[in-house]
Amino acid sequence: MRVHKRALTGRVVAMLLPSIMLASPVWANNSLTKINQQQLDRLADTLDVKYRLLSNMPEQCPGSTAEFCYHAQIELTSPFTVNVDGWKILYSQVYPSSETKSQQLTLRHFNGDLNHIAPNQAFNGFKAGESQVIEMWVGSSLLNEGELMPNYILTADGLDPKVIKSTQSYIEADTGLEIKPYAAVSDSESVMKSHPEDQYGQHTSAALFEKYTIDNYPVDSVKHAIVPTPNAIEVFERSAPLDLKKGLNVHLVGVEYGEVAAALSRLAELGAKQSHEGVKVIVKVSGTAQGMAGSYQLDTRKGKVFIEAQDSEGAFYGLQSLASLLSLDTMQVPAVKVVDEPRYEYRGLHLDVARNFRSKEFVLRLLGKMAAYKLNKLHFHLADDEGWRIEIPGLPELTELSSHRCIDLDDKDCLQPQLGSALNAGRDGYYSLSDYQEILNFAKQHHIEVIPSLDMPGHSRAAVKAMEKRFYTLTKQGEHAAAKQYLVSDPKDVTEYRSIQHYNDNTLNVCMESTYAFVDKVISEVANQHKKAGSPLNIYHIGADETAGAWIESPACKQFIADKSNDVHEVEELTGYFIERVSRMIAAKGIEVAGWNDGLSETRQDKMPNKVASYVWATLPQNAHKVVSAHARRGWDIILATPDVTYLDFPYELDPKESGYKWGSRRTNSQTIFEFMPDNLPANAEFKKDTIGRNYVADDRTQVDENGKFVHQPLPEGFRVTGIQGHLWSEVIRKDHLAEYMLFPRLLALAEKAWHRASWEVPYNYAGEKYDHTTNFLTAQKRALRDRQWQDFIHAVGHKELEKFDKLGVFYRIPNVVSKVIDNKLHASTIIPGLPIQYRIGNGSWLEYTAPVDLKAGKNIELRALSPDRRRPGRIELADIENQSNL
């Protein structure tokens, strides 16, 4: 890996250089001078930066037409007088400012999320203890600290850049969570309200206490629980449980050991190792197909375990259910009979390793946890604007340049420092050929199919810059034909555009034959890797979303459109043409093409292969049901990717300290996922809300326009989606363990929806129906059943699965404690039952919460929950006593 010397120096200096202490608090002349290296280093070490939210609902949103905007300021304070100019501060901000105001500073958008602050002509230096402030208005809302990127870079021409220390985040020792000392986002309602109709101010701690607290739940029933819930289970209370303390004596019939070894390994990690003295376990594969792949029966009566399945996948899942039944405190398994099969063929998780890299070890651990809860597809997002993460033979530039980011801005030896990535420990890297082979083999052992995704034609900046480097390098060497072979950008293209992530240079040029040569080369090499691992590439996801006004001034595209043989008449048709052509290329290799629904919608059905998988990521209030129906009527497979349910990079709760984007959902916890009805998308309008908590209408009836043309029809009779997947995009996730925090435990609720069809869900009406919060297809009886089954599920998570997470070292989210004042006493609870809760008054010691706390003891009461093993606390919450009325 080659790294630009200055970029490397900047990173090393930021981490290793000690502060240079000067004798005097004033080290510059009264008049401004150009900053030198010593001054830059000192200023980076001592400058205090604060990003302060002022309002999410300002009176005006200058320069913006967005429905939401926020008003904020960046405050720069030096403890010393520093009369220097010629410097800039580079920093990442998710949404560019639409308007700024400052007496002495300017703020401009550079590219992507990268912005820079610089002194203007009125700048007269930093005065000791006095703040320089720049105000901004941004066309979005700012509701948690997750969007505030770290690692502001102080830079100047000719000098080594350095990260400003006060903008570095750190990991809190006891909770393991990321702390951002530069972030100032209040949780006061006046700041957090983002719209006049914003309803989420009602989600107070007291309101959540009412929602989460359940009295008199029969906890003993948890010992029979399996996560995800099986299709049918019969419990034999009078039969003795199996004691697995002496282990398992496993006998395999019709199945190879390697096909179930991973499940047996998990049982061993939980304490049930293989032993000749252990309980007899018979695992039999009949080979006779009687249901969906993965079906099995499990019987734990008569002193032994008997698992029968039609295939090795079912045998594997039968053993995983045995592990779920196991109670770690007793090492016992109750006497039950289980008849089980999956709800969907496709039960997936999308993992973005492009924006911020995840280590190979993380991926392997994640595959093991996915398999434990019967997820069977890893949608592996390996390339995007901010990174390329897989080695491609013959194209070394992809990983030499685009697998890492640095401080330099010219993209010659590394990519720009997007997403606050000036310090890259743990966030840079790629999977070598041997790494990818190991991942594929490990996935195969866990009955998981890896579906690679290298986004195109948009979201492709990493590829564009790597192939530009290849072009210029080979051109200098006189190898002109080789230089052009895989070029994916038109050097003469002067089109000005901005992608939805605010890039101006991130789209493959779809009018150049060399672009298709590049795509073919990449897909062929990836397919070869799958073939080598004995895991054929059956489906490939091309992305195909969010192209944004590119190519208009490209000479190559003007020439392409002028050629009438191309069947493209307008620049707006180019995205569809690219997707159609690449889809046919993939189909010719015997691979099913997949893509996001927005790009696929631009194609002509007669130009597409017969077999296509559409991943629908429209939200429920944005008529996801209409997109599903339109693509179902094209005969395509549908994978539900509705962000307001399946995006696990959104916040768990309405808390400014939580991390995550929020454009599709302000809060996504285990319960919001559990309540989702995936087979009847429009019916979710009876209880779900839009992004600010408003009700919405989902009209699934046949609709025609004024010309009598169908604009919407219900799903074709008998149609069902192929599956559902969760999504972990990684823009704001900088550490492997924080990725686990965002995934767990709510991924278990996603697995529940993928595996189990609940009896309370409203059946789909193929004749069409209209739903809103006043309709009552989800009857009171169904809601009551749903709520009871939710309690069964979440008690199983709290009393059984989290203990297994503790034993296996999973860094899951410990929920916040919610509380309510009743009869002058503070009552506390969490969304997950069974966790220890502690409180402290003032700065006192932590005490066990065993009963409501008398408020006479003091009103400054802090609360926190602990993991079941008591080794890790969750985030501290200050009880909101003043704003609660006693009942």
Image (tube, grey):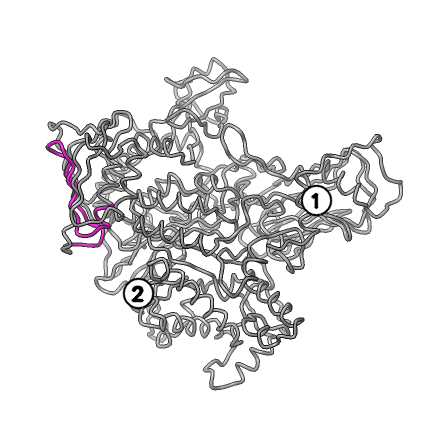
Q: Which mark is residue 162?
A: 1
Contact, CB < 8 Å: mark 1 with mark 2? no
Q: Amino acid at mark 2?
A: Ala
Residue reaching furthest to the front: 276
Q: Secondary structure at mark 2?
A: helix
Q: Secondary structure at mark 1?
A: strand
Tell me if residue 158 comes above or below residue 531 in the rendering: above
- Residue at 50%, 26% (x, y): give it: 878
Query: Is 141 left, or right, of 351 in this rendering?
Result: right
Is residue 620 visible in the rendered image? The answer is: no
Pointer 2 local density, CA inside 10 Å: few below 14, some 14–19, many at least 20: many
- Residue at 70%, 47% (x, y): give it: 9
Q: Position of residue 445 (x, y in %)?
A: 31, 49
Q: Position of residue 551 (x, y in %)?
A: 57, 72
Pointer 1 local density, CA inside 10 Å: few below 14, some 14–19, many at least 20: many
Q: Is residue 826 magenta?
A: no
Query: Is 280 left, or right, of 263 in this rendering?
Result: left
Instruction: State which tag comes first along the sequence, 1 or 2.
Output: 1
Residue reaching furthest to the top: 856
Q: Identify the image quadrant of residue 723.
A: bottom left
Tell me if residue 848 comes above or below residue 606 in the rendering: above
Q: Which mark is residue 632?
A: 2
Residue extent of the magenta highlight: 291-316
- Residue at 37%, 38% (x, y): give it: 745
Q: Position of residue 304 (x, y in %)?
A: 14, 34
Q: Which mark is residue 720?
A: none
